Amino acid sequence: MSAPSEPENTSDPGKNTEPETADAIAQALGTAAARSGLGALAQADQPNGKVLLEAMGGIRGIFEAVLPGLLFLVVYTIDQNLPLALGISVGVAAIFTVLRLVQKTPVSSALGGLIAAGASAVLALVTNRPEDNFVLGFVTNGVYAAALLISIAVRWPVIGLIAGYLMNEGTAWKRNATKRRVFAILTFCWAGMFLLRLAVQLPLYLSGNVEWLAATKLIMGIPLYAPLLILTWLVVRALYRKIPSEA
């Protein structure tokens, strides 16, 4: 008598692939968000100035993000000396990185800024076009905008993945139509910020207006990022108070 055969697995293996992939992406994004300071914002009762400052990396993080670009703008506007302006900008970024290494503080943000500043400077020096110092920034903004828009198109908005992780809900928010809609809108707002930067700065790049290009990069950096960050968290917090986590 032959042994009974095992029941066939008639389920579609592909059905579980999407949620598992989304869970993995959500965990990676959520972990990165928590380490960047958004975890503190998520745990705060009131998103006050101190908490928001911490979410942006503190005073030190703001200086690391702003000062190299600001020095490039000032030096280039005064002297029109591209190597000098780039050298000072990259040098300051390098100093920030070395200080973090010496003090054994998290170095990823400063190191990323240094690599970006160095690569941009090399490109501008090779082409001898000061405006090419901003090309990598255009690429970064374009990639972020595309990724966010694609996440909306495939119905896994990035803000939902991050919020679900930080609110200990995982991807259970997908079962709620209101959360899906709100997260899609918030994700579109973030994509809009990156697209707005491109819409304003690309014409300046094409016209070779380096001074205004450097200035708008600063103006459309933290001054745009910070209000959108706090608005996003206020909406997410209100949403989860109205519709508790299903986890």
Image: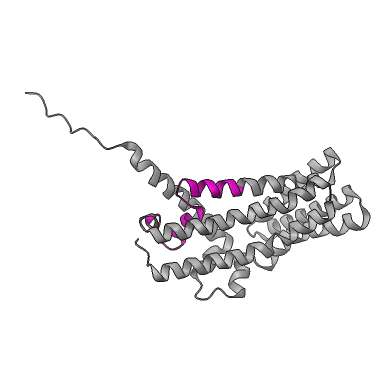
Q: Residue furthest right?
A: 79
Q: Nearer the viewer, residue 23 or 220?
A: 220
Could you say which quadrant of the image residue 226 lies in? bottom right
Compared to 7, does 110 lie above or below? below
Compared to 136, does 62 lie above or below? below
Could you say which quadrant of the image residue 181 lies in? bottom left
Q: Residue furthest top?
A: 1
Looking at the picture, the colour scheme in use is one colour
Q: Is residue 22 visible?
A: yes
Q: Residue furthest left?
A: 1
Residue 150 percent coordinates (x, y): 52, 45
Compared to 41, does 123 lie above or below? above
Q: Residue at x 52, y 76 (%)?
A: 46
Residue 43 located left or right of residue 113: left
Main secondary structure type of the part rendered in magenta: helix
Q: Residue at x 80, y 42 (%)?
A: 122
Whether 51 is among the magenta residues is no
Q: Quadrant of the C terminus?
A: bottom left
Residue 147 located left or right of residue 104: left
Residue 63 percent coordinates (x, y): 73, 63
Residue 4 located left or right of residue 190: left
Q: Is residue 165 visible?
A: no
Residue 111 percent coordinates (x, y): 68, 51
Residue 114 located left or right of residue 91: left
Q: Quadrant of the N terminus?
A: top left
Residue 64 percent coordinates (x, y): 72, 60
Whether 167 is among the magenta residues is yes
Residues in magenta, as a range: 144-172
Number of dots carrying numbers: 0
